[in-house]
């Protein structure tokens, strides 16, 4: 078994190289922007720079590890460790100078995500977790909310870049929204999962995510006591909720159609 604390230190070293530039005052000045799956699915040269820098830093410390990145990085591992990277999760927020974006790095060991590191440059918050070691924010342990009443639960979600799926997601909200306190749409999935982990919101759901969107955040959430269920492999949504409302919330998502929208 790899030393999880050591892997987390490697993730921290990579973040130390990219966070200062991504939080600088002139970071958006003159950057080029392209699109991917649709006109609303944007990628910037800073996404690509961040991914390249993270890989360069990790490879200098662990040259035989593998990589899987949102912007195309893919290399097999000789050690059993694959680094799953979202160089800027929430690119639209980043581009518009809005909070809600982060840099997300997970260490996947023999196919299981065991280390998660998510950094919010706007708040300068470092969320960290190792499997079995608990979750922290800036070094202080965090824990999911004790919410037991779904009607007063604050729920985070996100929406697809595809117009038809967005329409279906909006229709699902007509069933889901009246059953909870309110819905919040912040930006990237990684910070949404961290928000459930530290009790800022009580639940989260979204469909159509990539493994790099959720890998690190899911480790952090689970270690904070969140009930996490990835139904995407069977065509559903990625779900996370406080234990006191998890069963009821998951059933509501199913009933609303959000699980397949």
Image (cartoon, grey):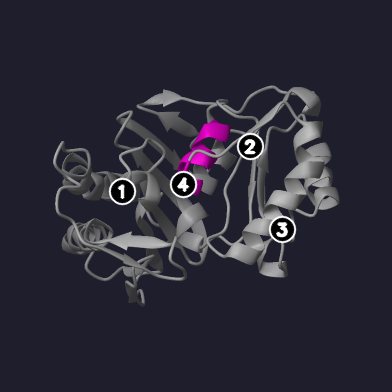
Which residue is label 3 attached to?
168
Q: Which of marks 3 and 2 is nearer the N terminus?
A: 3
Q: Measured from the top left, where is residue 192 in percent x and y?
A: 52, 40
Per the image, the residue denoted by label 2 is 226
Q: Name the residue under label 4.
A: 188
Is 64 colored magenta in this rendering? no
Q: Earlier in the sequence, mark 4 or mark 2?
A: 4
Q: In this view, does 139 lie above or below 130?
A: above
Q: Which of marks 3 and 1 is nearer the N terminus?
A: 1
Q: Nearer the viewer, mark 3 or mark 4?
A: 3
Instruction: Using a 10 Å C-alpha cutoff, classify the residue at mark 4 as few (fewer than 14 neighbours), some (14 to 19) or many (20 or more).
Output: many
Which one is earlier in the sequence, the residue at label 1 or at label 2? 1
Given this view, does label 1 or label 2 mark the residue nearer the observer?
Answer: 1
Q: Quadrant of the C terminus?
A: bottom right
**Residue 219, image x and y in percent?**
52, 46
Residue drawn at x 26%, y 50% as measured from the top left: 10
Which mark lies nearer to you, 1 or 4? Answer: 1
Q: Quadrant of residue 242?
A: top right
Provide the secondary structure element on which disc 4 rests: loop
Identify the residue position indicated by label 1 in the image.
95
CA gap between label 3 and label 1 equals: 26 Å
**Which label sits on residue 26?**
none
Image vertical order of residue 224 relative to residue 113, above or below? above
- Helix, strand or loop for disc 3: helix
Q: Tell me the magenta residue range.
A: 187-197
Question: In the shown orientation, is residue 176 left or right of residue 50?
Answer: right
Q: Nearer the viewer, residue 232 or 180?
A: 180
């Amino acid at each position: 078994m790899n030393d999880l604390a050591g892997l987390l230190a490697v993730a921290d070293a990579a973040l130390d190289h990219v966070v200062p530039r991504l939080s600088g005052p002139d970071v958006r000045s003159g950057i080029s922007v392209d699109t991917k799956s649709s006109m609303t699915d944007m990628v910037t040269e800073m996404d690509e720079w961040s991914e390249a820098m993270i890989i360069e830093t990790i490879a200098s410390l662990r040259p035989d590890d593998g990589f899987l990145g949102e912007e195309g990085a893919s290399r097999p591992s000789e050690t059993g460790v694959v680094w799953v990277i979202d160089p800027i999760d929430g690119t639209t927020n980043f581009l518009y100078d809005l909070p809600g974006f982060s840099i997300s790095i997970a260490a996947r060991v023999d196919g299981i995500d065991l280390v998660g590191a998510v950094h919010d440059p706007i708040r300068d918050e470092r969320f960290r977790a190792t499997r079995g070691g608990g979750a922290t924010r800036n070094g202080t342990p965090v824990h999911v909310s004790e919410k037991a009443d779904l009607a007063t639960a604050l729920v985070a979600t996100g929406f697809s870049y595809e117009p038809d799926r967005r329409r279906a997601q909006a229709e699902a909200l007509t069933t889901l929204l009246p059953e909870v306190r309110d819905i919040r749409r912040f930006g990237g999935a990684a910070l949404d999962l961290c928000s459930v982990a530290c009790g800022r919101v009580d639940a989260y759901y979204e469909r159509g995510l990539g493994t790099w969107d959720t890998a690190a955040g899911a480790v952090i959430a689970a270690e904070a006591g969140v009930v996490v269920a990835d139904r995407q492999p069977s065509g559903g949504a990625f779900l996370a909720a406080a234990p006191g409302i998890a069963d009821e919330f998951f059933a509501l998502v199913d009933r609303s159609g959000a699980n397949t929208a």
